[in-house]
Amino acid sequence: MILIALGSNLQTKQFGTSQELLENVLKYMRKKEIKLMDRSSWYRSAPIPASDQPWFVNGVAQVATSLGPKALLEALHAVESDYGRTRSRRNESRTLDLDLLAYEDQVIDEPDGLKLPHPRLQERAFVLMPLAEVAPQWHHPISGMTAAEMLASLPPGQQVERIVEGA
C-alpha cells in the first residue's frame, strides 16, 4: 500500500480554494504515473506549530505507481512545484504539500533524504484521522500500530475537523 498525505492552506487565483486545488491535484497526479486508488474525506486543521496562518485542508490518498519510492517522492515534489509550491522556510503557508507517508512496508532512512514511513505521521492528527479513514487495515511497519491506535495515543489539543460535503 502506497499512502500520500495532501495539504494546502493558500488559495490561488489559478486553482481556487485549498479544497479545489487538492481535488485538482488528485486528477493531475495521473500525468506523473500516479494512479488514485482511494482517498479520504477532507479535513480542516490548525497549523502546527500554532501560528496566524490560515487553517489547512488535509487528506490522505492511497495510490498505485510503477515508480520506486525515491522516484515517487521526486514526482510529488514536481507536482508541488507545478502548483506553485516554493520551499523557503519550514512550517510556512503553502499552496500544496505532498508527503509520502508509506510505500508498502518499506523502512528507509537516508541521511538528508527519503524517510519511510514518514517520520512524524504518528504525531499528527491531521494525518492520522484521514489515514484511519482511507486505510484502516494499514499498520505502521516499525511500531505495528494502526492509524486508529496511533490517533488514540495522541495527547489532546490538535484541532482537526472533518469537512462535511455540501454543508
Image: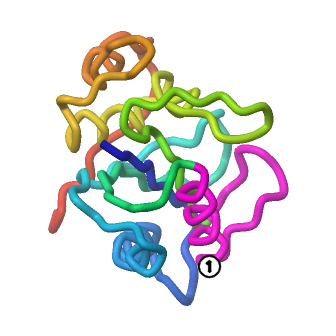
Q: Residues within 10 Å of mark 1 (few under 14, many from 20)?
A: few
Q: Which image quadrant for residue 136?
A: top left
Residue 163 in picture, x, y percent from top left: 26, 53
Depth check, front residue: 94 or 111:
111
Q: Residue at x 65, y 33 (%)?
A: 49
Q: Which span of residues is magenta-colored?
A: 70-94
Q: Is residue 83 above or below residue 80?
A: below
Depth check, front residue: 83 or 93:
83
Q: Residue at x 22, y 38 (%)?
A: 135
- What secondary structure is found at the residue carrying circle 1? helix
45 to the left or right of 42: right
Residue 84 magenta-highlighted:
yes
Rendered-image quadrant of the C terminus: bottom left
Residue 160 magenta-highlighted:
no
Rendered-image quadrant of the N terminus: top left
Depth check, front residue: 153 or 29:
29
Q: What residue did someone put label 1 on? A: 82
As drawn, the residue found furthest toward the right would be 88
Q: Is residue 158 above or below residue 70?
A: above
Residue 91 in picture, x, y percent from top left: 71, 44
In the rendered structure, which amino acid carries the disc numbered 1? Asp
Q: Is residue 48 above or below residue 93?
A: above
Depth check, front residue: 87 or 74:
74
Q: Is residue 127 above or below residue 67?
A: above
Indicate the colouring scheme: rainbow
Count of all numbered marks drawn on residues in the image: 1
As drawn, the residue found furthest toward the bottom would be 14
8 to the left or right of 104: right
Q: Residue at x 78, y 31 (%)?
A: 111
Q: Which image quadrant for residue 102?
A: top left
